[in-house]
Each structure stands twice: as C-alpha cells, then as structure tokens.
Image (cartoon, rainbow, N blue to C red):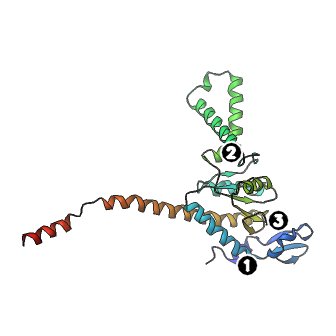
C-alpha cells in the first residue's frame, strides 16, 4: 500500500514541472504532458517511486545507519532543518563544503576544532583572552556552527544521501556517486534522473511540494528507527529471560521421585 495518495500530491503541487523548453529529455518517462508551456509530472509514477524510496530509507534507518539530507536552496533549507532535526539525522542546509564526503577526515578535523572552541567558552578559557581575541573566536565558532553544527555527531560517511534539487547539489551527488553511496532525490523535469539511485519525480521548487515529499520520507525513517528500537529491546530482554532458573519444573521432578 502506498504511503501517499495521488490526490495528496496533487494538492501539494508536486506535479508542476519546469518550462517545457528547459526540460531534460531523460525525464520523459515521468512526464504526463504539457500545459501552458509547463511540463506536468505523472503523479502515478511519483507515488510508486516515492513509495520505493520510503521503504528503502526505512530499511537503512532500521539497520542503524545514518542518512544525510542536503538542501541549500532557500525554499527547502528551513523545511529540511525542521523536519530532519525531529528524527536526529544529519543535514546540510548552508553551503556544501567541498570534499564533505570524499575528504571526510578534513571535515572531522573542523568539527573537532569547533568542539574545542566550545569547550574554551564553557570552561572559562575564552574569558582570559583579550576582547579582540574573544570576538574573533566567537565569530569563528558561529560560522562553524552554521556550516557544521548539524553534522557534528556524524562520525563516519553516511549510508545514504537525500537531496532536494540535484542540479543545485550536483557536487554532493558527484561525491556520493564516487564513494558508492546511494542517492535519494527529488528530481524535477529539468534534471537528469540517471545518476540518482532512487529518483522521485517531483516539483523541487515549491515549499508545499518539498514539505509533502519530506513528510513521507521522514515518516518512513521514523518507522525504521522505531522498529530498530523494538528489536534492540527484545534482544536485551532475551538473555535475561534465558538466565532465569526454572524452579517450577525442578520442583515437579522432585515430587515424582519422592512418589
């Protein structure tokens, strides 16, 4: 059963593509038609592709792996930051740092530097500096928090990438492909779906469309995380149950022997 209906996508404007003269021919299989010079996305295919992507993301989350969300365009950044924060996954909504994936060691060094500055602020070390030094330190910290804050606890490269607007985030997509990291993405009619492992044909410009697609994706990931927790709790309970002595059975055997 699909996680979202045709009508829900229609109401959110997911079907509106770009001007037909700006289309990418590789999106032809996902285009229903043209209206007033604008391509219309086939929402029946969007339903299928979104459901496939949601199920795959649920399995990744269930396995305990991380999914990195990338959306630096103005229409998407606030939506992504709000919704992804709720499930504790990392995200990039400011500038994509070149080498974020392919040179992950350098990124981790920057994160450690940010942590050390935060420690200086909390333990009073910064208070011993001059006013100018403290101001410079604070500016550095604010900039690093803005660019790296949401990925501070990401200790290894993610298991998957979710992208809003593959054309704008082409560097992120290229890095993920180079490392063999599967890419999930909203793909509009002006984009090439071929490099994307799980392409979701959708309007990637309208906030309502972005929000609707993310709602489905976030719900699927949350399900995976919940299932992982249930399985983990069962595993932890199993050894305790196995170690309990079976006193009742031994008591019956003693009674039989006495008889």
Q: CA distance from mark 2 to mark 3?
A: 27 Å
Assign a secondary structure to mark 3. Answer: loop
In this view of the protein, which residue sits in the foreground, 126 or 249?
A: 249
User: Quick check: 162 left or right of 118?
Assistant: right
**Residue 49 appears in which quarter of the rendering?**
bottom right
Q: What residue sits 69% from the left and 38% below the top?
A: 142
Q: CA distance from mark 2 to mark 1?
A: 38 Å
Q: Badge 1 is on which residue?
A: 44
**Residue 144 appears in which quarter of the rendering?**
top right
Nearest to viewer (mark 2 / mark 1)? 2
Q: Badge 2 is on which residue?
A: 104
> Which label's residue is closer to the chain start, 1 or 3?
1
Q: CA distance from mark 1 to mark 3?
A: 19 Å
Task: Locate the N terminus and report the quarter of the image it occupies.
Answer: bottom right
In this view of the protein, which residue sits in the foreground, 28 or 246?
A: 246
The x and y percentages for residue 156 are: 62, 48
The x and y percentages for residue 104 are: 68, 45
Assign a secondary structure to mark 2. Answer: helix
Assign a secondary structure to mark 1. Answer: helix
Q: Badge 3 is on which residue?
A: 192
Q: What residue sits 48% from the left and 60% below the top?
A: 229
In this view of the protein, which residue sits in the foreground, 135 or 71?
A: 71
The x and y percentages for residue 24 are: 87, 68
Task: Locate the C terminus and report the quarter of the image it occupies.
Answer: bottom left
Tell me: residue 85, above or below residue 131.
below
Local crowd at mark 1 within 10 Å, few (<14), some, or many (≥20)? some
């Amino acid at each position: 059963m699909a996680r979202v209906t045709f009508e829900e996508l229609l109401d959110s404007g997911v079907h509106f593509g770009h001007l037909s003269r700006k289309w990418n021919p590789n999106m032809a299989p996902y285009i229903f038609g043209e209206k007033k010079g604008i391509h219309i996305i086939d929402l029946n295919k969007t339903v299928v592709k979104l459901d496939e992507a949601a199920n795959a993301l649920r399995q990744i989350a269930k396995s305990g792996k991380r999914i990195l969300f990338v959306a630096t365009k103005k229409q998407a950044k606030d939506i992504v930051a709000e919704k992804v924060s709720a499930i504790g996954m990392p995200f990039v909504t400011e500038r994509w740092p070149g080498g974020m994936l392919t040179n992950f060691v350098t990124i981790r060094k920057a994160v450690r530097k940010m942590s050390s500055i935060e420690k200086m602020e909390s333990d009073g070390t910064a208070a011993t500096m001059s006013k100018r030094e403290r101001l410079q330190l604070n500016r550095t910290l604010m900039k690093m928090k803005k660019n790296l804050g949401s990925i501070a606890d990401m200790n290894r490269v993610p298991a998957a990438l979710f992208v809003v607007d593959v054309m704008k985030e082409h560097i992120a997509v290229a890095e993920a492909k180079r490392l063999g990291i599967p890419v999930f993405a909203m793909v509009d009619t002006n984009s090439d779906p071929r490099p994307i492992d799980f392409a979701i044909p959708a309007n990637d410009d309208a906030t309502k469309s972005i929000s609707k697609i993310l709602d489905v994706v976030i719900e699927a990931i949350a399900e995976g995380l919940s299932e992982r927790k249930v399985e983990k709790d069962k595993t932890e309970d199993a050894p305790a149950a196995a170690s309990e002595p079976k006193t009742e059975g031994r008591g019956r055997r003693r009674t039989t022997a006495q008889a």
